[in-house]
Image (cartoon, rainbow, N blue to C red):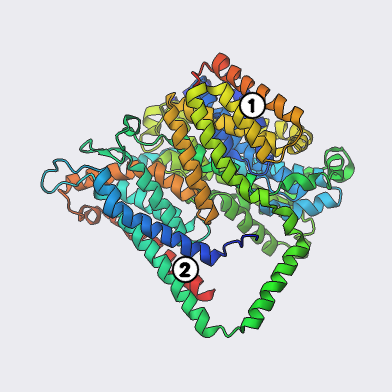
Amino acid sequence: MEKRKLSPSEKDCLSAIIFFVFGILMLAVIIPVGIPVGFVPPGQISPRFLPNFLSAAITFVAALMLLLHFFKRIKSKSSFSKSSEEVSAGESIEKLSDKKLGDEKKSPKNLKLAPILSIIIIVVYFLLLIFVGFIPSSIFAMIFTMLMFDERRWYVIVTSSILIPLAVWVFATKLLHLPMP
Amino acid sequence: MFTQFFAGISLILSWKVWAANIVGIIIGTIVGAIPGLGPVIAIAVLIPVTFALPTVPAMMLLLGVYQAGIYGGSISAVLFNIPGVPASAATAFDGFPLAQKGQAGKALKIALYASTFGNIFSCLVLLLVAAPLSAVALRFGPPELAALLLLALTVISAVSGGSMLKGLLSGLLGILFSTVGLDPIWGTARFTMGFPQLENGLALVPVLIGLFAISELLIQVGQPDPTLQIGKNNFFESKSTRTSKENHVSFLEMWRMRGVMFYSAIIGLLFGILPGIGSTTPAFISYAFARQKSKNPELFGKGALEGVAAPETANNAVTGGALIPLLSFGIPGDAVTAVILGALMIQGITPGPFVFRDNGTQIYALLVGLIISTIPTLIVGRILLRYAVKVLKLKRSIIFSTVLVMCVIGAFSVNNSVSDVAIMCIFGFIGYGLRLLDFPLPPLLIGFVIGKGFEDALRQSLLLSQGSLSIFIKSPIAAGFVILSAIVLIWSFRVSFRLQKKN
């Protein structure tokens, strides 16, 4: 089954929920744990002042976004007399036109998986950087990133993933005198 | 002032300055032409290169990328209807129809000349305005500075495009990230989680590389290659580069467009000064304005020359405009100037009220250099026309995998620390998530950049008034800024409500 894309309104709702929860978590857990109060003379501002203010503002704006979203939904439900048949017909036309435009070809399954796999590649690249150093880890990252971008010519993958990290290493260490990991 | 000005001119009389600038222009033109990349990513990745250079050549390299980057975007917009940078989207409206008529060379030359005009105009204004404004800002105390930064943050969040509430959330999140590290008054560690590397706060370069470059990589990997259609439109290449009568641009043709270019430059400059808007909006506004004022509006969209000149002048005039608040107040006008701010700070120059007093010679060198660098931009731009098309055919797989490796070096080299690479990765994932949910990233970056200064000024003001907020009302300047911030905030909420109602 192909996953449906989120509509702008659904994105707004999801964003509002994420930021609302984040704001509450900041106020209730992260700030009390992450910032020790220590000694603050009377009448002076605590180190928690700005983070608390910002987190409260984030919570407030997110709540406002959420309210606006629900207000919009209620209004559209009451005023918009669109029959379910019409909706489904509209949706099917939309799907049909999408198919006509050839969107299926543009977004194959691997395009949806690619960002997640790329995140994994970046994390592994970082870990390898610590343990094996710049050149081997960069060769690894380049090979898999190229594969993610649908590069299938092995000679391109091999030559670029070896030559580019080496060239970058020489440029950084010999010309710019930068220390490398 | 004049001593610093002439000393500045003597600083740019070096081959190193112009060699660095030309390299920057070449990189900027090429990177601007490649969809997905852009001046922000290029400058961020080039920051380590500047460590090995003296201040003026280093900054001329980055400013060359900035100046040429937006013009580079017009190459792919005109030839393939794929804007290299969002600011060039309006250029494609008439540039691409011109290319279809076999006048791609003409469209690109007009784009180049209009870009050069926009750059010169805005940089001249920058040269004239930045120092006097900076002198005014020197009179500001902590309450005025805090109120000014509050106004900047409010404007950035309100006008950054998309949902205003999302812009506001993005800006607030940026300031929140700037609070990581030691508290500026009491020295208490905040959100450091026991890591001493975080005590100095999050470094700017890894944060911005993550937000813009890594998130772009993740976005691009999930999208089909936009340059695939280049193969289909290949016939433009020969027509764009060949020297024929129909691709020639006469002085008279440019002179006829002087009015269009002049008010487009003013639009670009004014929008550039306003923080957070960037160069896309003024390009569209100047296009619409040019169409409205034109005697032949029906030609727009079908290959009108003014339709190319107007957006290209405006989006390049943003360059000088955005540097005005950066140099005078330390407030970056857009994401690129935020990166330039970071680069200047690495070079030991802190933009803001004291910049002309402390580093006047170098700043004047850069301002004069920016104006003169329009000449190499013009020459290099013309030479690069045919080669930029070839670069466009480079596979995304090679471009983005190289960008990833360069990003790691960029993040690592700031403090020679692997923890900065981790910060870059984390911010890359945050940026990707935010972009998926349609959040604008510039408010986050600008909030992060000016957040520390805002907190310092705010805390100092409250220390002076022993915790009383009345200090912001007692000073008329600060009160004016606070009232303006409130107006912007109320206006943005009203617009948000109206939009929701309309929908």
| Quarter of the rendering occupied by the C terminus of chain B | bottom right
Residue found at the very far right of the displayed protein: B244
Which of the 4 quarters of the picture holds residue B70? Answer: top right
Which of the 4 quarters of the picture holds residue A119? Answer: top right
Q: What amino acid does circle 1 point to?
A: Val
Task: Residue B317: give x, y in percent of width and height.
Answer: 59, 45
Instruction: Judge whether residue A138 can be spotted in this image.
Output: yes
* Mark 1 residue crowding within 10 angstroms, few (<14) / some (14–19) / many (20+): some
- The image shows residue B498, relative to residue B55, as above or below, that is below
Q: What amino acid does circle 2 point to?
A: Val
Residue bearing the label numbered 2: B495
Left or right of B143 in this view: B67? right
Q: Residue at x 84, y 43 (%)?
A: B234
Q: CA distance from mark 2 to mark 1?
A: 44 Å
> Do the residues bearing badges 2 and 1 touch, measured as CB atoms within 8 Å?
no
* Mark 2 residue crowding within 10 angstroms, few (<14) / some (14–19) / many (20+): some
Task: Residue B340: give x, y in percent of width and height.
Answer: 49, 35
Q: Residue at x 47, y 65 (%)?
A: A13
Q: Residue at x 71, y 41 (%)?
A: A150
Marked residue nearer the N-terminal end (2 or 1):
1
Residues beneath discs 2 and 1 located on the same chain: yes
Residue bearing the label numbered 1: B23
| Quarter of the rendering occupied by the N terminus of chain B | top left
Left or right of B254 in this view: A169? left
Q: Tell me the subunit letter for badge 1.
A: B
Task: Residue B404: give x, y in percent of width and height.
Answer: 58, 34
